[in-house]
Structures are given as structure tokens and as C-alpha cells.
Amino acid sequence: MLFFVQPIYNLLIDYHYYQYSSGSIRTLTTLSVIGILYFCIGNCLLVGKKTKLDKMYIKKGAIKKATVLIGLVTLVSILFSFIDAGTLNIMSLSRMELKNATFFRLIATYGFYTTSIMYFLVFFTVKARRRTNVLKWLLIFIILETLIFMLFRTRSMLVVHSASVMIGYYYSGLYGYNKYNSRVSPKFITMAMGVGLFLVAITSRFLRGFLQPNQNITNFDFDLKAFLEASIQSGDIGYSTTVLDVINYVPATQDLLGGQSYYRLLFIAVPRSIWENKPLNTQQVVANWLAPEIPGMSIPPGIIGDAYINFGVSGILILLIIGVFFSSLDRKLSIKNFMVWAVSATWIFHLVRGGFTNPLIIFLMLFVVSTFINYRIFNKNMIRMDFWEPEFKDAAGYK
């Protein structure tokens, strides 16, 4: 979607490609179309003949234990965020001031990513909960997401947490004892939640500018049509012009990176204070090329743009490897896999958007935490069965 919505909009509604040569546009088309084909081929290579669905009840005590564990991590992350801010009056700080990361903010960021596991588990078991309990968690979600948005002025956490709620609810019928039978299809409700999340994510991009010091939120003018157009032309769902910019720039002005975007993952643990010339990430490199006058700027080139500036058109083969990687995560349907996919919305988006090292680090951290919860907490508290017999609900703690 990131690489096709903008071209379709520009070709059918408002053409903005006059400054690009036909050769650059052909290269973009080749990268976009072939990239999707390679990803699909890679994704099919490890697909088995039959995907097995493990059905089981998870005891309520295990769900509660995992929820409390991640809840404590979330509280510590909030504390670290305020320590990093240096004040309780976070509204007095600009987005740039909040963006200057310290050790405390880095730990808080990773901690808030694990919060998505808590949300998944809560709404994964939503049909076995009392309505008052569900309302309590909805209130917690609203308060916590508002606070995190104010602390970070970014939508990443809101998106990943909301996606966890959606996926947890969607799969809530597959595990545990369902206390309530919904008359509305879970697919319809999940789709409605997805549309709502999309609109909130788009709107919050423009709203956060009015949360800056010396700004007044009452001056915010909600214009969904303008928000969508701006997001398509340059933003959330419009990356084709950025890819065209780097196609024009490389190799005409700069040499290919030769894999720097990928092999720098090996050096991520080395502090820049020790290795001053450690390779920059792709967003910083592209920003130095296209906007050198703006210090601290980052410009993600999209996953296909990243592949191109490293190896040229042949770099699109990277999508084949990424397809295999995603296929390996999707071979078995289990509670661990559901957790991993539920918390993956943001790092996958940033991977497609053009980051590489940071998304993979986030994935590895979430994968380790999900695996720990699965094997240390859930494995000892699962009741497996071939049929959903009513008597199992008592053994699982759902009464």
C-alpha cells in the first residue's frame, strides 16, 4: 500500500511526477511490482501442506500472571519516561525535546512495546470476562494511550497497542471459554476497529503539532479529506516520491551502499562513543543526501528504496529473503505465534517504511518476551483437547 496508493492517486487525480524522468519511474515500477512478487514467492517456500491449529484452554491464573508481569513493566516504563523528561509538566516540552533519547527513554520505549502483549492477552480472553472488567480495561487503554502519546508525541505505540487489541479480540473465539455469544461477526467488528484505528492514526499526525508549547489545541481544525491527501502525497501511505528521489540520487551522485543498511546490524551493540565512525542507519544516510541542511533529520526510503540504494535494482531480491522470514513465523498457529503477530504491527510498518536494524531489534525483543511467557507461564497452565467439551471450562478456571 505504501508504494501503490500514491502513484494511483497521482495518475488518476493529481499528477505530481513531472520532475522525474521516465527512466526513474520505470525503475520504481519494476522495484514495486517485482518486489511484491519476490516477497510472495519467498512467503510460499516454507508453507506446509496443512497448518495445524492447537486448541486449548489457558487457565485464568496464567493469563493474570502474564498480564501482571507486563503491567509492572509498563509502570516502570512510565516512571522512566518521566525521569527522562525531567518534569511532570510534559506539556511544556516540545516533540524535539522529548525525542532526544537517553538510556531511560530507550528502556521505556522497549517496555511500552511489550505493553502490547498485555493488551493482546486481555482482549484475547475478553469473551470470558465480566462486562465490568472489559469496561475497566477499555478505560485503562484510553488513559494509558493518552499518557504515552503525550510523553512521546508519536503514534507508534498507539498503533501497536490498538493492533494488539484488534488481533486479541479477533482470535478470542479460538481459545478459552466464551462467556458471551456476539450477534455481530468478529470479522466485522475487527474491520470496524481497523478503520477507526486508521483514522485516529492519520488524525493524530496533525493533532500533535497543536500539542507543542505556545500552541493551542482549540485551534486544531479537523479536516479528514486534507489529512488523507497530505498522508498520500507525503507521509503515512505515500513513499513513492521518496523512492524516486533516491533513484535519482544513486548512483548518479552517491555510490551504492553495498549492504551497509543490513550488515550494520552486526555492530548495533557497539556504542558510537567507542566507534565514532560507525555506519549510520538508512534513514540518517538518506536525510544527509536529500536534506543535509536539517540536522538530526531522518528520511526513510521505504523497503524497496533501501534495497535499491544498497545493491541497485538487483537488491530487490532482499524481498525474497524477507518473504521466507515471514513465512517461517507463520507456519504454525499457536498462542505464541498469535502473540508475536499481535505485537508486530509497528515493527513491520517501520520495516516496510525503510528501517531495518531497529525493527528487527524490536522484533527480537518481543519474540523473546513472548517465548518466555509461553514456555514459563502458559505451557504449565494449558489444557489441550480435541473437542471443546463444556467440562473443560471449570478445569481452566472459567466459570
Image (cartoon, helix red, strand yellow):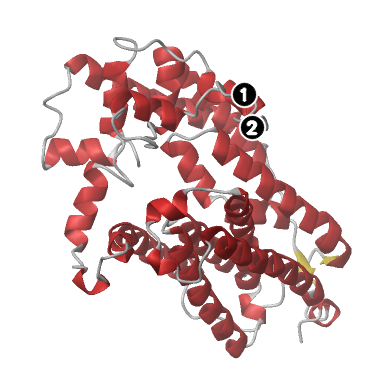
Name the foreground residue: 299 vs 175. 299
Q: Pointers 2 and 1 in contact (CB under 8 A)?
A: yes
Picture layout, residue 337 above or below residue 395: above
Query: From the viewer's perspective, is residue 328 above or below residue 66?
Result: above
Query: Residue 226 or 380: which is nearer the viewer?
Result: 226
Residue 114 vs 179, above or below: the answer is above
- Provide the residue designation for mark 2: 271
Which residue is located at x 45 percent, y 71 percent?
A: 89
Residue 117 to residue 96: above or below: below
Residue shown at the point (71%, 68%) measured from the top left: 72
Left or right of 179? Residue 64 is: right
Q: Secondary structure at mark 2?
A: loop
**Quarter occupied by the N terminus:** top left
- The residue sitting at 51% across, 43% down in the picture is 348
Residue type at numbered disc 1: Trp
Q: Quadrant of residue 254?
A: top left
In the drawing, what numbered circle is on residue 266?
A: none
x%, y% of residue 324?
Answer: 60, 30
Q: CA distance from mark 2 to mark 1?
A: 6 Å
Q: How many C-alpha atoms fall within 10 Å of the one at disc 2: few (<14), some, or many (≥20)?
A: few
On the image, which quarter does residue 173 sit in?
bottom right
Mark 2 belongs to which amino acid?
A: Pro
User: Which percent across, then down, holds residue 93?
Assistant: 40, 61
Which dot marks residue 275? 1
Q: Secondary structure at mark 1?
A: loop
Asked whether the viewer can see residue 363, the reply is yes
Provide residue 32's location: percent of width, then percent of height.
35, 28
